[in-house]
Structure formats: structure tokens, C-alpha cells
Image (cartoon, helix red, strand yellow):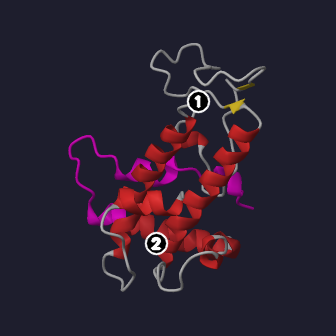
Amino acid sequence: LFSKSYLHFANFLSPLTDSHSTKVGLENMDYVRKFIDDIHSLFPESSSIYKEIIEPNFCSSVYLEFFCNVVERTANLLAMWQAIGFVHGNLKPENLNIFGLGKGYDRFTFLDEYDSDFLSNLIDKTSLYSFKNQNNTCREHCRSLGRAILPLCMDSRAEVPSTLEDMIEEILK
């Protein structure tokens, strides 16, 4: 049995990484397309969240809808963390799950008192994973994921916002 907890952002980004090129090849897009199709067949509920709260024609592509769902779930997870003062400490793509399940909690902590600059990861010299930067870090990972997924929508009749950043901002409102 395949577990939802194994499906993280890096699953989509790794095959797109080519040490010799910054271009996304067709074979890599085929991988992402098949991966999303397989997720939909294994976990039909993977398309249910965002579909219910958006305008009817906004996400007519299964791949765009999938991306919208992942962003929505990530925003919900982050909102829960921020509400209780949780600092993850290691928000890499490998630790962000497409179903909004957290993982990689080896450097986490809770705030005893509010301090937006608090770091739970002492080796984080750039404050990338600080309490106040968790939001931006997750947004950047969503952008990277969108760059991997949204090219699949270009052949469909889906209404794709003019820029990926506009789309992410619209979804995260």
C-alpha cells in the first residue's frame, strides 16, 4: 500500500533537475503528468478540496486543479502552524507534502512567547526557516512546484492566470 506521506514536493522537482540544463524536457513533463495521473487514481480525494471553493471554469485542467489543491493544503498547514506558534525549522521541498501533511520535524519547536525572528534550527544562518519566514519559504516552494506542473496546462483549455505568481497569490488570499 502506498502512503500519502511519501508524496512530497521534491517528488515533482527531482526529475526536472538536470545538471546540464535548466530546461524542462518533454520526458520530464511526461513523468510529472503520469505521476499526477497516478496520484488521482490512487487517491481520488486529491482533487476534492480546491474544486469546491473556486469559480467553475478556473481550474478545468486536472493538472491546474491538482496544483491549486496542493497550494491550498500547504496554506492550511502553514496557517495551523502559525496559529499555534509552531516553527518547523527545516522547510525543504522534501518536508512539504502535497496533501498538507507535515514531515521532517527533527528541528521543530514551539514559541514560548511571540518572537517573529525565532529560529528553531540553529544552523539556519539566513533565517530562511524563522517563524516569520515560514510563509515566504512555503510560497517559494509552491512557485517551484507550479513551474514543474503548470506547463502541463498549456495544451488544455484551462484558464491559466497570466503569471504563476498571480495564480499563487490568488489562491493564497
Is residue 51 toward the left or the right of residue 171 in the image? right
Is residue 13 toward the left or the right of residue 135 in the image? left
With respect to residue 1, does 93 lie above or below?
above
Residue 61 among magenta residues: no
Residue carrying label 2: 64
Q: Quadrant of residue 48?
A: bottom right
The percent coordinates of residue 124 (x first, y second) are 52, 18
User: Element under label 2?
Assistant: helix
Q: CA distance from mark 2 to mark 1?
A: 27 Å
Q: Which residues are magenta?
A: 1-29
For the N terminus, the image quarter is: bottom right
The percent coordinates of residue 49 (x first, y second) are 66, 70
Residue that appears at 56% across and 36% down: 134
Neighbor class of circle 2 (other Cα within 10 Å; few <14, some 14-19, many 20+) is many
The percent coordinates of residue 140 (x first, y second) are 44, 44
Mark 2 in CB contact with mark 1 (< 8 angstroms): no
Q: Amino acid at mark 2?
A: Leu
Q: Earlier in the sequence, mark 2 or mark 1?
A: 2
For the C terminus, the image quarter is: bottom right
Residue carrying label 1: 90
Residue that appears at 33% across and 67% down: 151
